[in-house]
Image (tube, rainbow, N blue to C red):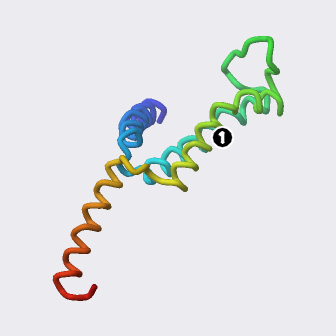
């Protein structure tokens, strides 16, 4: 289903990228991007490793085998490591998630102080 998945991945990249920029649901979209990059690596680099890749490569880097995969996986690796970093660290202090959490914390503190539990 490449015609359907191309649209789904395109929407995920645009919506997820904007959400990560603004810090909204950062960890959720990080997990989705990690899954996307794993699928991308497995679907494109295995055929390159075996020498059956339909994509022509320039003659300078290795075209098949282990070294070709290492040469081509560098941007995928950077993207997956960035997503893992965002998954671990989460959104920053200026993000929508942080603002939403602070609002919830303020309401929680007000409710606790009204009940006399402080």
Q: Which residue is drawn at 30% across and 61% down?
A: 102
Q: From the viewer's perspective, is residue 114 above or below residue 108?
A: below
Disc 1 element: helix
Image x and y of residue 11, in percent: 37, 35
**Residue at numbered disc 1:** 42
Q: In which quarter of the image is the C terminus?
A: bottom left
**Image position, residue 68 (x, y; %):** 79, 27
Does residue 108 lie above or below 30 as drawn? below
User: In the figure, is residue 86 to the left or right of 3?
Assistant: right
Instruction: Give residue 5's position: percent from left, percent from top.
Output: 45, 36
Question: Does residue 52 appear left or right of residue 83 in this picture?
Answer: right
Residue count near mark 1 (Cα–Cα under 10 Å), binned few <14, some 14–19, many ≥20: few
97 vs 42, nearest the viewer: 97
Taking the image as shown, residue 77 lies to the left or right of residue 51, namely left
Instruction: Pick out the residue farthest to the left.
Output: 114
Residue visible at 74% across and 29% down? Answer: 48
Q: Is residue 27 left or right of residue 51?
A: left
**Residue 75 in the image: above or below residue 98:** above
Count of marks, rendered view: 1
- Please report the residue visible at 58 percent of the width from the left and 41 percent of the height from the top: 37
x 47%, y 53%: residue: 90
Name the image quarter holding residue 108: bottom left
Q: Quadrant of residue 17?
A: top left
* Farthest bottom residue in view: 116
Residue sitting at the far top: 59
């Amino acid at each position: 289903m490449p015609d359907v998945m191309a649209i789904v991945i395109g929407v995920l990249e645009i919506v997820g990228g904007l959400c990560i920029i603004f810090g909204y649901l950062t960890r959720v979209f990080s997990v989705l991007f990690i899954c996307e990059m794993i699928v991308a690596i497995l679907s494109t680099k295995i055929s390159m490793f075996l020498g059956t890749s339909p994509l022509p490569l320039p003659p300078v880097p290795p075209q098949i085998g282990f070294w070709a995969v290492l040469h081509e996986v560098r941007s995928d690796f950077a993207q997956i490591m960035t997503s893992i970093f965002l998954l671990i660290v989460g959104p920053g202090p200026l993000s929508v998630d942080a603002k939403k959490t602070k609002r919830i914390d303020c309401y929680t503190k007000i409710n606790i102080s009204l009940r006399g539990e402080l």
